[in-house]
Image: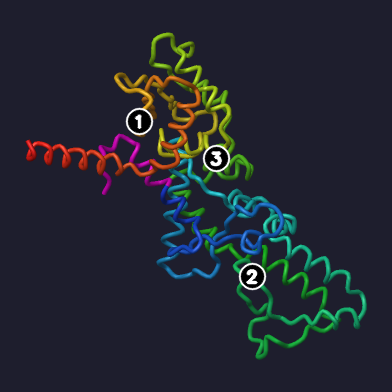
Amino acid sequence: GEGGSDYGGLFRDSVKEVSSELQCNPSTLRLLVPCPNQRMGLGDNQDRWVPNPALRSRRHMRMFRFLGALMGSGVRTGNPMELDLASFVWKNLVGENCTLGDLEAVDEQFGQEIAMLRKATSGEQWAALGRTWRVRGVSGKRVCLRSGLDNSATPVAFAERESYIASYVAYRLGECAVPIAAIREGFNEVVPNLVLPLLTWRELEIRVCGNATIDVQALRSITEHNIPGKDKHPLAVKFWNVVTGFTNDDRAALLAFAWGRRRLPPSNRGGMHLKLELLHGRGDEALPEAHTCFFAIDIPNYSSEEVLRQKLLYAIHNCRCIDNDFVARGAALHHGEEALLEE
């Protein structure tokens, strides 16, 4: 457990940790695997993940359904999950047709491979490619396109090239259909199944995952300045100057520090407000404090903007575990007891 009282902050933090655990490599769960571009360091969208098509057991289907239920709860409550799924996953969930372009977006090598196959217009050119019925899947594993084929290493004849290419593309388009169907089933346990067809894939992604890009003005518009002078107070001015100079990753870390999530829900669904408080009696030696349950940050009245920047950056990038507060408090009590014994 974590050393805190849960008024929402611990739950949000736990969902953030679930997202991080799903999208780490190597992962013990392996429910999601890196897209080919990420795995090979090629092309765009190298941050994207796809459901693992090799996981077909009942236990894994329950896991995928639970993931879908978490995604649905994010939509219902306005608490986004930090998932970076490939576009063809979202399209499958809402019922949009996937294309070769969706596969190429996360597997540049596959697109080049198909283009090369289509350029082979003679038997000699085709034979030089040395194609067999054994092909590469999204996770990098080799599979046979023809069931019941005794030898998957059998060369593909020139006369079979069109059916081979069509089979290859069709296989890759439907490769993750089983886990995606389980995710959709879990999602519909929380959100009515009439909702998905009403959304585009991009709308669904934003509703589930929030906005990956954190706009300073959007964040400022939902901030309550609980200090004298409100946003005109020198501390508030310093704070927003510092946040404006942050990278997007820094701003995401700031949200995680204050709220337990790295993304804002679309249009601030849920009505959350960042609360900026003055930490009285502390100076340049102290760090900011956060209350994730209440989306609040207490900041000492630092002497300069540079001090605030250094202290805030240290806090948001090094104080990631809610339990640290509990450990720190316990350590402080322990040291206090030692001091009493010494006296």
Residue pointed to by mark 2: 137
Q: Percent x, y for residue 119?
A: 88, 69
Which dot, 1 or 2, sits closer to the camera?
1
Of residues 106 and 291, the one nearer the viewer is: 291
- From the viewer's side, name the closer residue of 258 and 264: 258
On the image, which quarter does residue 293 sit in? Answer: top left
Q: Circles 1 and 2: CB distance less than 8 Å? A: no
Residue 49 located within the stretch drawn in magenta: no
Mark earlier in primary sequence (1, 2): 2
Q: Which mark is residue 289?
A: 1
Q: Which mark is residue 249?
A: 3
Tag 3: residue type? Asp
Q: Looking at the image, is mark 3 or mark 2 nearer the viewer?
A: 3
| Badge 2 density bin: few <14, some 14–19, many ≥20, Cα 10 Å | some
Q: Nearer the viewer, residue 219 or 297?
A: 297
* Residue 129 located left or right of residue 80: right
Q: What residue type is labelled 1?
A: Glu
Q: Could you tell me residue 9's position as x and y percent?
A: 35, 37
6 inside magenta stretch: yes
Secondary element type, mark 1: strand
Circle 2: element type: loop
Asked if labels 3 and 1 touch by Cβ distance under 8 angstroms, the answer is no
Q: Where is residue 253 in the image (x, y as percent from the top left)?
A: 48, 38
Separation of residues labelled 1 and 3 (CA atoms): 20 Å
- Which residue appears farthest toward the top when viewing the image? 229
Label 3 element class? helix
Point out the stretch of residues depicted in magenta.
Answer: 1-16
